[in-house]
Image (cartoon, coloured by chain):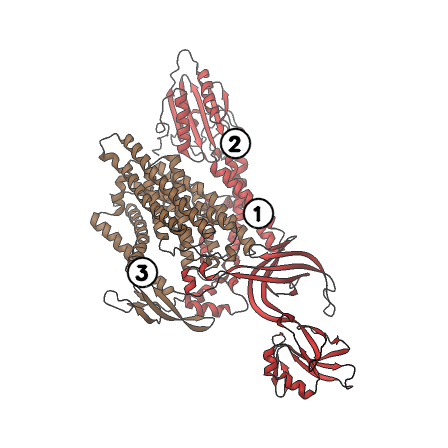
Chain colours: A red, B brown
């Protein structure tokens, strides 16, 4: 069936038009007195096409606010499911999740895991919902914004009477003009009143269209554009960003950030705790200590040569030096280094041991030992010290030294000392850095038995370099954050425009001394009634806010 | 008197004045019919008095805030007590803004009680200010928490107006199925409010008499069973699972808990939390029936006459307007500022932490509310029910998540 879509004013409307695009005459249920459906000014939208192919079907599905509202509701409920039990991303290291959920939360936990809810937000259905919301945002906006733009662009000043009468705010009255004032003069006077209220007024004889804050109509669409940019940026980020979590670096050390060309040095770590009297009585009772601050002096390097060659020292190029604290990450060209955690991990790094002959002899020289990576040979004075045994965590088993691990927790060195006036074979000399080990493994007895005339020891604790702490860093490379912030900003602008201003329109015409006035707003009817009442009263028409509320529909 | 005590004194005075304000707003609305004077004059005169009292209370509330900020050295919004006190102050601001726009005294009669209930509820949590851990030391503590709370404050007024709208429009004389359902729904909300009040009453009552009970209970930690200790401030209806009594003041003749918590409740202190919930439900229910039996009518039916002169459409609009004002603020504070901070402090702008998820759920719910109002037939009552449900979600996000679901925000303390 082909509808005749030409309005009586002569305007040819597209199929599906509710209110004539030109004069506003209702195109459907013409004779009814009910309030008009003013949404999108009654323009035809693509989604309302009569004959639909499959693209149109998808389009009209996604353009429906009803569908959008359901999507929001389902996403909301889905998201809440993920907060019932902890999600898998909170667990560090390898644990058997199936086992964990069952033992921790019983049968419910088992079902939770089996339904895949331990990874709610990474699941295909949740991500699918987000994609659908994104698609719905695009289609809903496009379907409405273009027709609405056209409709608001070409508004006629003189509207059809039934258009004005069927507005939610509407009034009809005989105009009592004072001494010789014409209807046109009154309209002009009313125009001035409205202009003072910041309306843009278009007048055509005794007909008038006043409008203000039309831009607020674009608020929702600007907000939606922002949200789309945001969602796209999140998608882009998930494809391009990389991160390395929980990189431990000991104070005083340089370490490679795994899988990257970057190296990070932890020069110094500082931590400060709250004094007891600064804590609440509850914390004091529990004997808790709370950090006041912790920070790391860090240096970021980039490897420029010998990066993949384990036998060569990598050549590092210093990029940036910065103190990192919890709310102050180091940033360098899209790379960010965050301080997340620290641990007390006392460990020996360096020792400056003095070599001397037994007895009151003076010092021959100082031996600078890098405990984790000792050199093969050291020269002290005229003597050479060859490292013939190195036990990072020394222990004694079945009559010989062994090491329990590769971590220098209890380092012990066996030197072969050669030099002038010594036997050709030299002397074997054992040196343990920690006094505890020296006593436990009887270092001095061993050296005496071996006949070593030497003594190797530190003069004071200051000759020991100890690393007290390990800082844990998260390292991220992401260049998409600016897009995310841009999306969020646009969204906010849209929300502000849409919610803090209201689009208001007033139509008026005078026919044979009868004033018909109607008004429409998308929000805040109380406000527009108040405003219109004041304006009419100023122009000499006595009304109150209640009388201009159109009660046709009883609302 | 030191600064902290002075600030608490100001706050106490503010609370007293808020309550007076509610009373005077009540006289403004309901006294119209008693007084021989013209209704409009009565409303104007008493409305102005009520407003003056409310503003004075608010000024004292601000005095508290400033003094506490000075004495603590950081903005007082970093534990549950401070946060809720700030929120109640912001609800007053939201109320004052909407009152300035619409000038309906009945908004005071219903909006200010929200301020008071939250303020009283806050007083249950420890009053001391807690030291800031490094994660919280940022200017974003000021802007993120304050903006989010301001958004929530507008949602609170949206709730209050929606609630009055329902009280005004639900047909208490009706016996049709839909009327009955709405009556029951409304009574349910009254009951929930009284459960909050009941919680506060029970807590203070037993704190007042110095009630104490302590138990040991086993708990699994990193695969090992360790013994934990818990102190009850309310008489233990439910003891911890496999508890061992240390001390217990006798209550109603027994000096043993009536029962113990089921074994599947594993969280730390979950039994004492369950016990508190039981006490709140109990006291709330007793309060509800007490009021109902004394008045011999349902609570909604008692309050309804006070709302008779109100225009339901206006109430609906106030509710919607308040939410519409709050929505952008909430988006900015609870999502955007939150993301900025999370990016700086936790190295990711979004991490699906329970508190984050619930902020998103709140946001999605209000987006739902705003969109569904576009559909036909969703203005008025359905919309008001949604405004009520929305605020319940807000309260759950604020309090429930911290109490029930532990997450990164748990350090904000309770």
Q: x, y percentage for residue A8?
A: 48, 25
Disc 2 is placed on an element classified as helix
Q: Chain of mark 1?
A: A
Q: Are marks 1 and 3 in contact (CB under 8 Å)?
A: no
How far apart, in angstroms, are the residues tagged by discs 2 and 3? 59 Å
Q: Which residue is mark 1?
A: A485
Residue A448 position, x and y percent, is: 67, 87
Q: Say if A499 sits above or below A273 in the image.
A: above
Q: CA distance from mark 2 to mark 1?
A: 33 Å
Instruction: Using the rendered view, name the quadrant where residue B167 is placed.
Output: top left
State which mark lies toward you, 2 or 3.
3
Whether residue A185 is visible: yes
- Relative to residue A134, is residue B316 drawn left or right? left
Where is mark 2, residue-wise?
Answer: A151
Q: Residues within 10 Å of mark 2 (few under 14, many from 20)?
A: some
Pick the front one: B345 or A553? B345
| Classed neighbour count for the residue bearing mark 1: other residues with Cα under 10 Å, few (<14), some (14–19), many (≥20) | some
On the image, numbered disc 3 is attached to which residue? B278
Q: Nearer the viewer, mark 2 or mark 1?
A: 1
Which of the two residues, B409 or B185, is positioned nearer the viewer here? B409
């Amino acid at each position: 069936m082909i509808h005749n879509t030409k309005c009586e004013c002569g305007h040819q409307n597209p199929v599906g038009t509710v209110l004539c695009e030109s004069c506003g005459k209702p195109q459907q249920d013409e004779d009814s007195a009910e309030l008009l459906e003013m949404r999108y000014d009654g323009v035809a939208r693509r989604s309302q096409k009569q004959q639909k192919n499959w693209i149109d079907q998808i389009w009209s599905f996604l353009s429906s606010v009803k569908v959008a509202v359901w999507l929001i509701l389902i996403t909301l409920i889905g998201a809440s499911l993920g907060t019932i039990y902890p999600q898998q991303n909170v667990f560090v290291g390898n644990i058997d999740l199936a086992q964990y959920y069952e033992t921790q939360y019983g049968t419910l936990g088992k079902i939770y895991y089996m339904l895949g809810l331990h990874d709610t937000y990474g699941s295909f259905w949740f991500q699918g919902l987000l994609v659908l919301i994104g698609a719905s945002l695009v289609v809903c906006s496009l379907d409405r914004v273009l027709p609405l733009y056209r409709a608001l662009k070409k508004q006629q000043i003189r509207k059809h009477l039934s258009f004005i009468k069927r507005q939610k705010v509407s009034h009809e009255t005989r105009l009592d003009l004072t001494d010789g004032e014409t209807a046109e003069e009154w309209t002009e006077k009313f125009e001035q009143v409205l202009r003072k209220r910041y309306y843009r007024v278009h007048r055509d004889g005794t007909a008038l269209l006043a409008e203000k804050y039309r831009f607020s109509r674009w608020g929702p669409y600007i907000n939606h554009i922002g949200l789309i940019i945001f969602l796209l940026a999140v998608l882009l980020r998930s494809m391009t960003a990389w991160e390395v979590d929980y990189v431990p670096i000991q104070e005083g050390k340089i370490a490679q950030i795994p899988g990257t060309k970057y190296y990070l040095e932890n020069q110094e770590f500082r931590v400060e705790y709250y004094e007891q009297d600064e804590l609440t009585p509850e914390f004091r009772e529990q004997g808790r200590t709370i950090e006041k601050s912790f920070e790391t002096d860090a240096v970021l390097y980039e490897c420029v040569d010998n990066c993949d060659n384990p036998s060569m020292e990598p050549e590092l190029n210093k990029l940036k030096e910065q103190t990192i604290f919890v709310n102050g990450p180091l940033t360098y060209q899209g790379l960010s280094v965050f301080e997340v955690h620290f641990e007390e991990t006392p460990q020996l790094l360096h020792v400056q041991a003095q070599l001397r002959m037994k007895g009151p002899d003076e010092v021959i020289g100082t031996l600078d030992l890098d405990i984790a990576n000792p050199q093969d040979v050291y020269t002290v004075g005229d003597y050479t010290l060859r490292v013939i045994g190195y036990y990072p965590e020394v222990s004694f088993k079945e009559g010989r030294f062994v090491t329990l691990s590769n971590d220098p927790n209890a380092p012990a060195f066996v030197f072969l000392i050669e030099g002038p006036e010594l036997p050709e074979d030299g002397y074997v000399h054992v040196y343990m850095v920690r006094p505890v080990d020296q006593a436990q493994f009887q270092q001095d007895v061993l050296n005496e038995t071996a006949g070593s005339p030497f003594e190797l020891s530190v003069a004071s604790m200051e000759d020991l370099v100890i690393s007290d702490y390990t800082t844990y860093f998260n390292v991220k490379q992401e260049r998409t954050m600016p897009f995310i912030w841009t999306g969020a900003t646009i969204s906010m602008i849209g929300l502000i425009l849409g919610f803090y201003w209201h689009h208001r329109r007033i139509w008026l015409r005078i026919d044979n001394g009868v004033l018909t006035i109607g008004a429409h707003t998308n929000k805040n009817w109380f406000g527009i009634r108040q405003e219109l009442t004041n304006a009419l009263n100023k122009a000499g028409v006595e009304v109150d806010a209640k009388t201009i509320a159109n009660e046709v529909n009883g609302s | 008197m030191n600064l902290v005590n002075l600030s608490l004194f100001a706050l106490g005075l503010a609370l007293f004045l808020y309550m007076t304000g509610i009373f005077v707003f009540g006289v403004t609305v309901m006294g119209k019919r008693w007084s021989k004077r013209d209704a409009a004059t009565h409303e104007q005169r008493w409305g102005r008095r009520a407003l003056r009292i409310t503003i004075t209370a608010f000024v004292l509330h601000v005095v508290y805030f400033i003094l506490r900020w000075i004495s603590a050295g950081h903005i007082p919004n970093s534990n549950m007590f401070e946060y809720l006190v700030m929120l109640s102050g912001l609800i007053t601001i939201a109320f004052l803004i909407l009152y300035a726009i619409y000038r309906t005294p009945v908004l005071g009669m219903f909006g200010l009680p929200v301020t008071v209930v939250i303020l009283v509820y806050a007083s249950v949590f420890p009053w001391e200010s807690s030291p800031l851990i490094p994660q919280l030391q940022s200017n974003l503590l000021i802007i993120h928490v304050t903006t989010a709370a301001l958004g929530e404050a507008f949602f609170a007024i949206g709730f209050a107006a929606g609630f009055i709208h329902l009280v005004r429009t639900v047909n208490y004389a009706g016996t049709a199925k839909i009327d009955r359902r709405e009556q029951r729904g409304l009574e349910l909300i009254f009951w929930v409010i009284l459960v909050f009040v009941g919680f506060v009453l029970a807590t203070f009552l037993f704190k007042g008499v110095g009630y104490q009970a302590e138990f040991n209970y086993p708990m699994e930690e990193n695969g090992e069973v360790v013994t934990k200790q818990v102190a009850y401030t309310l008489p233990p209806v439910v003891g911890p699972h496999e508890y061992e009594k240390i001390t217990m003041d006798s209550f109603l003749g027994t000096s043993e808990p009536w029962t113990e918590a089921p074994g599947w409740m594993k969280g730390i202190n979950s039994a004492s939390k369950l016990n508190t919930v039981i006490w709140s439900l109990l006291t709330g229910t007793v309060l509800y029936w007490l009021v109902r039996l004394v008045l011999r009518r349902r609570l909604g039916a008692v309050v309804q006459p006070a709302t008779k002169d109100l225009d339901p459409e206006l109430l609906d609009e106030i509710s919607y307007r308040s939410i519409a004002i709050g929505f952008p603020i909430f988006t900015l504070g609870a999502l955007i500022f939150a993301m900025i901070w999370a990016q700086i402090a936790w190295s990711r702008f979004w991490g699906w932490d329970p508190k984050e998820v619930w902020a998103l759920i709140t946001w999605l719910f209000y987006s739902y509310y705003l969109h569904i109002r576009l559909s036909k037939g969703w203005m008025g009552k359905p919309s008001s029910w949604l405004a009520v449900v929305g605020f319940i979600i807000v309260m759950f996000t604020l309090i429930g998540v911290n109490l029930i679901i532990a997450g990164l925000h748990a350090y904000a303390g309770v």
